[in-house]
Image: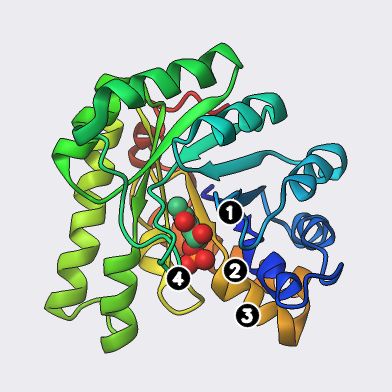
Amino acid sequence: MVELGVNIDHVATVRQARRGVEPDPVWAAVEALLGGADGITFHLREDRRHMQDRDIERLKEVVPGPLNFELAAVDSIVDFACAIKPAMAMLVPERREEVTTEGGLDVAGQKTRMREVVAKFAASGIRASAFIDAEARQIDAARECGFEVCEIHTGPYAHAFNRLHDETLPEVARELERVAEAGRLIQSAGMQFNAGHGLNYRNVGPIAALPGVSELHIGHSIVSRAIFDGMREAVREMKRLIEQASRAIDPQHSPQRDEGHKGNTKK
Ligand code: PXP
């Protein structure tokens, strides 16, 4: 079954608007797990605009589920991640002026640095994931650098879907096919295929139905829904949609889907 990592940064963003103590992202993480999340994702940015170091220490102390630590390849944050020992470290690009992560990491353009950071994570027993655009050269570079996981940036698909609301329209189908093709390349290179960014209750289905997709990381839409429905219910509904979509092509875990998971080292 496709797993859901809930990104809780957006809860910390609301708290930081007042620089107070509420809403607490650690509480949100526990609620998300109670709603059926398979893991918790967060991004410690260099400018500390949402998550704070102490939040992450508390997550590690309190949260009884896998943590996916998103970060830029900056020494101080890499060292902090190694000390925290999350299940997975996901390298992303970071620019101070951006509202959110805007594009995939250029692994191909900085292989020496990427190899260094992946080796540091490996020495701490942490699996490394690269957040990349759906491009063959980035997937090849990720494999060469020793990443075990690639998360494909679904933003272009999500934007096309949100504009047109129909995955069969050529523009949306083209973006979906780019993610699907990237997923095939990732799996044939022996890496785990994850996806995320911009996914919501309307556009998640076609991505959750892609053969071999392992984990989806979703934040903004779940936290937005949680304002009205509560975190547990918001997560429960997203899990329901993901399970429905993955079952639609795979009623009984067909060999095709299991084949897709062959390269995984996850379990
Ligand atoms: N994956 C990555 C690499 C991200 O940077 C983000 C946003 O922090 C997400 C997934 C989740 O994106 P969204 O908040 O749009 O669901």
Could you tell me which secondary element the residue under label 3 belongs to? helix
Residue type at numbered disc 3: Ser
Mark closest to the chain's N terminus, 1 or 2: 1
* Residue named by callout 3: 224
Tell me residue 141's x, y (percent). 22, 29
* Residue named by callout 2: 238
Seen in the picture, residue 9 relative to 110 is either above or below; the reply is below
- The quadrant the C terminus occupies is top right
Tell me residue 143's x, y (percent). 28, 25
Q: Nearer the viewer, residue 244 or 148?
A: 148
User: Looking at the image, is mark 2 or mark 4 nearer the viewer?
Assistant: 4
Seen in the picture, residue 218 relative to 129 is either above or below; the reply is below
Question: Gap between marks 2 and 4, in whole Å?
Answer: 24 Å
Tell whether label 1 touches label 4 (CB within 8 Å): no
Question: Gap between marks 3 and 4, in whole Å?
Answer: 16 Å
Residue type at numbered disc 1: Leu
Could you tell me which secondary element the residue under label 1 belongs to? strand
Residue ID at (62%, 72%): 222
Mark closest to the chain's N terminus, 1 or 3: 1
* Residue named by callout 1: 4
Question: Gap between marks 2 and 3, in whole Å?
Answer: 12 Å
